[in-house]
Image: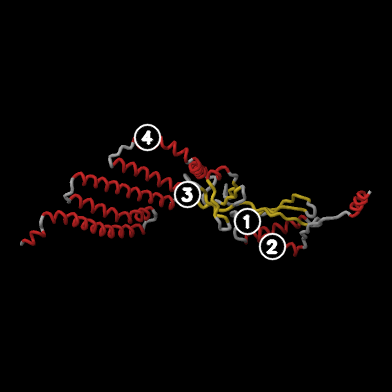
Amino acid sequence: MNRMAVIFSPELLAILAPVIVFVFVLLTGLVLRKFLFSRLERWAEHTKTDIDDIIIESTKGPFLIWCLMAGLYFSMEVSRLPEDIVDSLGKILSALAIISVTLVLANTAAKLISAYSRKFDAALPVNSLTKNVTKIVIFVVGGLIVLNSLGISITPILATLGVGGLAVALALQETLSNLFAGFYTSVSKQVRVGDFIKLETGEEGYVTDIGWRSTRVKMLSNNVVLIPNSKLAQAVITNYYLPDKELAVLVQVGVHYDSDLKKVEKVTCEVAKQVMKEVAGGVPEFVPFIRYHTFGDFSINFTVILRAKEFVDNYLIKHEFIKRLHERYKKEDIVIPYPIRAINYDQEKAYGAGTKK
């Protein structure tokens, strides 16, 4: 009887009760999590939108933290801790809850922006800069809510940030210059992620990302060029994807002066049409044409105008066109002359005689 009294003594129950409540709430939360998310995932598989999948994925992990927090909260309610300590711990748990919800919202927003980038791109281009700014805005709002829940006045903090912001701006002029240049580049849509660009310095490649400090350009050689946003905003850039991906492919050709120019034009256009229809990257519906433009030193020169679906396709189109045109010219007896340099011996002799005198 004495042992039973010791086991069920008020002091021991006061210690065990919070532990029991914590374990019970935690186990209940884990069971609820397994049941709830299994049902939600099955339901999300039958929906057409990706929003539900993103929300479920973003909340599945933090739900464990919420179960722990719920267990701690209810265990504190049945404990005999002093009221002021319970209140302080309750505020801390509330702040942690707000922080966890903020993290979930930030991750969800970033994933939604990535998933629906094509739709959002019409209003604002999607890159790491815009995604990070979205996260920062959510974190700032969540931080202000946390401070407010802890009873800390926000007004003095905002005033301090306003004064301190000027000092920070002066200290981080270059960083802020790159940041705002990145915003300008993104919003103006002069350079977008996925575009093929060429810099005035000669580097060319695909824009893979526009960050808060620099823009990443992946070259065809599989190297990455990092360009500070401020320099990118001031540079002379050729964007091969604006206003459209399709572009003209110009090939310079020269034929002998004795050539039949009508025949040359007919044969060249036939080969060009073949290339447009058969070579990957060509525009089948485009009708190639040529334009004679120069009486050269040893040939009559002209330009063949073809068309490619995007910039990188021009390499294969030129390769196939030159190869097929050379083969066809041989069959048609059309001569592509070698460079010729004629020496006037009489003039050279006269010049030599004059120098001897």
Mark 4 or 3, which is nearer the eye? 4
Between marks 2 and 4, how big is the CA–CA gap?
A: 73 Å
Q: Position of residue 186 (x, y in %)?
A: 50, 45
Q: Which residue is mark 4?
A: 159
**Which three-letter amino acid code belongs to the residue tagged 4?**
Ala
Q: Residues within 10 Å of mark 4 (few under 14, many from 20)?
A: few
Given residues 175 and 274, the one toward you in this image is 175
Given residues 122 and 224, the one toward you in this image is 224
Chain-order first, disc 4 or disc 1: 4
Mark 2 or 3, which is nearer the eye? 3
Q: In the picture provided, is 119 more to the left or to the right than 302? A: left
Between marks 4 and 3, how big is the CA–CA gap?
A: 32 Å
Count of marks overlaid on the render = 4
At x 78%, y 51%, the residue is: 295
Mark 4 or 1, which is nearer the eye? 4
Q: Which residue is mark 1?
A: 314
Mark 2 or 4, which is nearer the eye? 4
Q: Which residue is mark 3?
A: 127
Q: In the picture provided, is 296 more to the left or to the right than 27? A: right
Between marks 4 and 1, how big is the CA–CA gap?
A: 57 Å
Q: In the picture provided, is 33 more to the left or to the right than 305? A: left
Chain-order first, disc 2 or disc 3: 3
Dot 1 falls on a residue whose secondary structure is: helix
Q: Position of residue 328 (x, y in %)?
A: 72, 63
Chain-order first, disc 2 or disc 4: 4
Between marks 1 and 2, how big is the CA–CA gap?
A: 15 Å
Q: Residues within 10 Å of mark 1 (few under 14, many from 20)?
A: many
Q: Which residue is mark 2?
A: 324
